[in-house]
């Protein structure tokens, strides 16, 4: 199987490696949009196409057209992220191949692949039977496989960069919920912006990251990114939520956590149905005490 | 009759639900607590076309049906179980519809567009201190003077007194008054559009007062004295001496909507209970809903609510045939018994639901935090007698079924 | 300006029901609705029309019986013209077939200056149909848009992705998809609904669009409730002692997870 990947950043290398093995890949190629990423990931790919440009759908479309004119990958893999999905959709439009997103695992059954994907707001899993020639947008998961060293070539693409697109990178504050082992999440139960300090303090004490639910970011502007279907999907060891009710669109981004801990005054909050530890009580009593306790230990 | 809604009715229900979720649900507790209807909400409801739904579009109404008005009232009440906002909406559908049916074109084109937009209020002023159910016994008297009428009397328990004073345009009421003679009876009753304030100051001879009520906070209830209040003759609704006939039809219309409000509020309470009973666990992990003492009662209340709903929408459909579609063979009096049954059933069912739900909630139900008591107090006004006492409903039904002559005491 | 908004009738995932025993969804019991983002797409189209002039047309794929109400809804919001491509078992169509039908429609009934879609459907939330339509038509595109501005004939779209904010400047013809952040959709009034009730939409078949190939379908072998098993331990906190107990349990769990 000749497998092609859209490499959004190097954190996806172990993920693609995992699926590459699962799908009995024989050749691994990928597209990157920066020299930096290309240098890093080329160690693990047979061929790395480099297009040095800010992301835009136009750039992706041009690159895919060129790559498809050179080779016909049997399987294409994409990240189930905003850009990954857009790239996957563009690829599907160009090739006509079946494409499934939100894929978390694949089972092999004879010459068929059973693709498992999340649907209905992450409340259900559908298993779809596919044969050769298809595309998948996969969820990140936490794959520990060490990628195989391949040291393939870097192929620069002769495509004019997209100068119309402007990109403002998220502030690098060292707070990265996507890669942290513990994510401390604030929901609408947090009354004031100042109280976010408590959330940040707990994240700091546990060496993790913090995040919020959509209303706190989109409506109150307390953060520039949130966890949920329209925001980040995280899979830390521990997801600990304060004042988060657990709407389906939020939980979709949190279900990958190994442990879920929730503190909420409303005992009917849906988050409790999916918690390993649920605490029905005032977060303003539990959170400061937890911080004190952890400080004592330190 | 099989109760089925058309696609446009369902779409309208969804639209009202979305509106209520967006603008009413977040504030209903505060409205009840503070006892004030926000003026911007009333304006927004007007813009959304939630008033004057069964009023012809010729006079600024929506050109819909009473069934549509009932749907709107039910959905608003579900998101405002204390029902002040729902009752405001239902008054602004029922009494404008009555004016549309019986008023002159001049009167209608003056009042109805302003009510539809939410800039003016138009309610009902019938009750007097001696008792609301005895309309034939009212004391308010309108004396014919040159070019109009001079009215003296006092009305009590009237909705909208503060709103008439505060809304941009003002407004008034469908007023019933004796004309000609002060004798007991209904042939000497006439209906007027009493408009003490319209784009300006309060007219002379109108002396309002506002009462404080135990529930349904937000919609004002008060009273007023009419002290030589002069009404221009154009404000007479329909013909002189026919006011009793008009107001009884107006009550039929309003009672359908009152029933719809009680159903909406009751449905909210049952939904609260459903959530509570199926999640709360007692006695080593048994769900409350697993006790037959509870789930049998729940089943009964659910059934009663559905029955009240059927009564209400059957009456609404019939009213549409009479007043909106004007189908031959359908008479206003056909509505009396179907409406009486709906009004008898819906408020009492809502109260029964609240009493049971409050008990299921246990001590929590008795706290202010649960908010369930707000719906209980709000809907209770309709078993007391707003829009007609419950015994009047029984009389209407008994009179029809047993015969007028057989129920005379 | 001519705008097309393709919309999808989706399961309302907030009302999903599952068979307790088998874990299979009871889809017959789940209401089908126009998705939130589709509604935002219509709103975005209407706002562009209101400021720049033009017409807003909408398109769906399905059957008259199930789609009639949603078609009425789109008219009630203010769209000018509706089309329904009738396809049996439309729920099984794969994403490519949907994108293909939309692109064929746009070629035949267009050209459209802008095609606006919801970024993701309510039930399958793949976000792949809009980009596929753009590559099938070779139109400029931008997806997952939160903000729309028009400056001197140039359309400025802002989208928030995982790594930051992107601003795309495009000129028609283009395909875009919007999120629920883009706007708050208007709620149709009863007058709008009564007007919509009288409006007709055109019904066509895939063959009317010269679609010869057999539409590909999704071959689902099973679908089940998905839940990571959770411990479900609950602590009710009333007193200060309860707070201690809760905090101790959190600390124990953090140790177990090797966080501390």
Image (cartoon, rainbow, N blue to C red):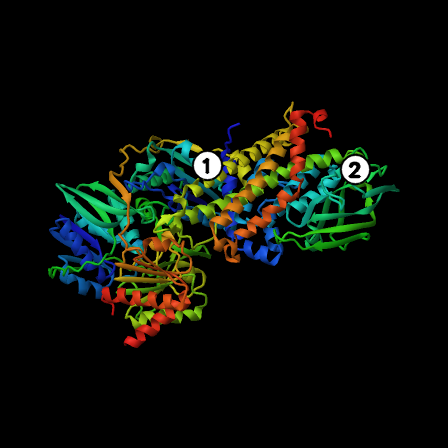
Residue A280, horizontal then vertical, whole percent = 39, 60
Residue neighbourhood size for the residue with mark 1, other residues' Cα within 10 Å, grouped as few (<14), some (14–19), many (≥20)? many
Closer mark to the observer between disc 2 and disc 1: 2
On the same chain, marks 2 and 1? The answer is no
Residue C258, horizontal then vertical, whole percent = 22, 66
Nearer to us in this view, C198 or A215: A215
Chain to which the residue tagged by mark 1 belongs: C
Residue bearing mark 1: C69
Nearer to us in this view, B231 or C258: C258
| Quadrant of the image occupied by residue B39 | bottom right
Left or right of B65 in this view: A201: left
Q: Residue at x 36, y 42 (%)?
A: C17
The label shown at residue B190 is: 2
Q: Is residue A8 above or below residue B55?
A: below
Q: State if disc 1 and disc 2 touch (CB < 8 Å).
A: no
Q: Is residue A272 above or below residue B342?
A: below
Q: Quadrant of the C terminus of chain B?
A: top right
Disc 2/disc 1 C-alpha distance (Å): 46 Å
| Quadrant of the image occupied by residue A267 | bottom left
Visible residue check, residue C173? no
Task: Label 2: state its secondary structure.
Answer: strand
């Amino acid at each position: 199987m000749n497998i092609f990947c859209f490499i959004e950043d190097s954190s996806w290398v172990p993920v693609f490696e995992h699926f590459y093995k699962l799908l009995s890949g024989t050749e691994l190629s990928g597209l990157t949009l920066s020299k930096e990423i290309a240098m890093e990931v080329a160690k693990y790919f047979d061929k790395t196409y480099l297009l040095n440009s800010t992301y835009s759908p136009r750039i992706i479309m041009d690159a895919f057209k060129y790559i498809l004119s050179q080779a016909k990958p049997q399987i294409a893999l994409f990240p189930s992220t905003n850009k990954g999905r857009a790239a996957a959709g563009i690829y599907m439009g160009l090739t006509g191949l079946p494409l499934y997103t939100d894929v978390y695992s694949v089972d092999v059954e004879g010459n068929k692949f059973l693709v498992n994907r999340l649907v209905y707001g992450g409340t259900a899993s559908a298993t779809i039977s596919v044969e050769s020639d298809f595309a998948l947008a996969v969820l990140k998961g936490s794959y520990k496989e060490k990628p195989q060293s391949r040291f393939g070539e870097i192929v620069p693409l002769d495509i004019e960069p997209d100068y119309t697109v402007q990109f403002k990178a998220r502030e690098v504050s060292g707070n990265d919920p996507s890669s942290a082992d513990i994510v401390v999440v604030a929901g609408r139960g947090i009354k004031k912006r100042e109280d976010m300090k408590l959330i940040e303090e707990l994240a700091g004490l546990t060496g993790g990251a913090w995040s919020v639910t959509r209303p706190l970011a989109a409506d109150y502007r307390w953060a520039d990114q949130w966890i949920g279907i329209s925001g980040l999907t995280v899979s830390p060891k521990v997801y600990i939520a304060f004042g988060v009710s657990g709407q389906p669109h939020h939980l979709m981004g949190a279900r990958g956590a190994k442990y879920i801990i929730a503190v909420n005054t409303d005992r009917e909050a849906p988050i409790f149905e999916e918690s390993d530890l649920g605490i029905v009580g005032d977060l303003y009593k539990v959170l400061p005490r937890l911080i004190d306790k952890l400080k004592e230990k330190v | 009759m099989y109760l089925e809604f058309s696609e446009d009715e369902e779409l309208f229900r969804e639209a009202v639900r979305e509106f209520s979720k967006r603008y009413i649900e977040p504030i209903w507790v505060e409205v009840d607590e503070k006892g004030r209807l926000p003026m911007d909400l009333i304006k927004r409801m007007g813009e959304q076309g939630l008033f004057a739904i069964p009023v012809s579009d010729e006079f600024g109404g929506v050109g819909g049906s009473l069934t549509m008005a009932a749907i709107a009232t039910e959905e608003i009440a579900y998101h405002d179980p204390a029902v002040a906002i729902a009752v405001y909406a239902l008054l602004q559908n029922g009494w404008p519809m009555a004016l549309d049916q019986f008023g002159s074109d001049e009167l209608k084109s003056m009042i109805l567009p302003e009510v539809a937009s939410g800039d003016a209020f138009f309610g009902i002023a019938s009750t007097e201190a001696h008792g609301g159910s005895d309309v034939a016994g009212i004391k308010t008297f309108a004396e014919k003077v040159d070019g109009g009428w001079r009215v003296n009397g006092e009305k009590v328990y009237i909705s909208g007194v503060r709103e008439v004073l505060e809304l941009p345009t003002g407004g008034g009421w469908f007023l019933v008054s004796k004309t000609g003679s002060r004798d007991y009876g209904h042939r000497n009753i006439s209906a007027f559009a009493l408009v003490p304030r319209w784009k300006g100051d309060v007219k002379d001879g109108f002396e309002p007062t506002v009462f404080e009520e135990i529930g349904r906070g937000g919609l004002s209830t008060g009273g007023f004295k009419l002290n030589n209040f002069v009404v221009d003759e154009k404000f007479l609704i329909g013909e002189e001496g026919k006011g009793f006939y008009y107001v009884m039809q107006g009550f039929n219309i309003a009672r359908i909507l009152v029933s719809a409000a009680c159903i909406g509020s009751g449905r909210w309470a049952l939904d609260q209970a459903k959530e509570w009973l199926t999640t709360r666990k007692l006695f080593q992990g048994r769900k409350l809903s697993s006790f037959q003492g509870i789930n049998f009662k729940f089943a009964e209340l659910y059934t009663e609510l559905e029955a009240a709903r059927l009564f209400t929408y059957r009456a609404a459909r019939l009213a549409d045939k009479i007043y909106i579609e004007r189908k031959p063979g359908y008479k206003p009096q056909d509505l009396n018994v179907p409406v009486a049954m709906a009004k008898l059933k819906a408020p009492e069912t809502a109260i029964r639901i609240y009493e049971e739900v409050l008990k299921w909630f246990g001590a929590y139900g008795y706290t202010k935090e649960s908010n369930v008591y707000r719906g209980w107090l709000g809907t209770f006004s309709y078993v007391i007698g707003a829009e007609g006492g419950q015994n009047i409903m029984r009389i209407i039904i008994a009179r029809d079924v047993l015969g007028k002559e057989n129920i005379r005491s | 300006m001519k705008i097309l908004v393709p919309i999808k009738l989706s399961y309302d995932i907030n009302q999903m029901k599952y068979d307790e025993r088998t874990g299979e969804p009871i889809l017959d019991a789940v209401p089908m609705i126009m998705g939130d983002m589709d509604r935002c797409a219509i709103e975005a189209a209407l706002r562009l029309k209101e400021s720049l002039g033009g017409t807003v047309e909408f398109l769906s794929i399905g059957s008259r019986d199930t789609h009639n109400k949603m078609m009425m809804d789109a008219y009630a919001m203010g769209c000018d013209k509706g089309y329904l491509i009738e396809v049996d078992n439309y729920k099984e169509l794969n994403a490519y077939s949907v994108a293909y039908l939309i692109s064929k429609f746009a070629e035949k009934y267009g050209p459209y200056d802008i095609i606006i879609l919801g970024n993701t459907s309510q039930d399958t939330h793949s976000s792949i149909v809009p980009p596929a339509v753009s590559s099938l038509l070779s139109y400029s595109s931008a997806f997952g848009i939160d903000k729309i501005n028009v400056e001197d004939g140039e359309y400025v779209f802002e989208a928030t992705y995982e790594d930051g904010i992107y601003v795309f400047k495009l000129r028609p013809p283009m395909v875009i998809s919007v999120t629920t952040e883009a706007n708050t959709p208007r709620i149709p009034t009863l007058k709008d609904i009564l007007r919509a009730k009288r409006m007709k939409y055109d019904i066509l078949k895939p063959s009317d669009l010269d679609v010869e190939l057999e539409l590909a379908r999704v071959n689902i072998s099973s679908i089940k409730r998905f839940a990571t098993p959770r411990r479900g331990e609950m602590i009710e906190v009333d007193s200060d002692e309860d707070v201690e107990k809760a905090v101790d349990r959190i600390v124990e769990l953090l140790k177990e997870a090797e966080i501390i």
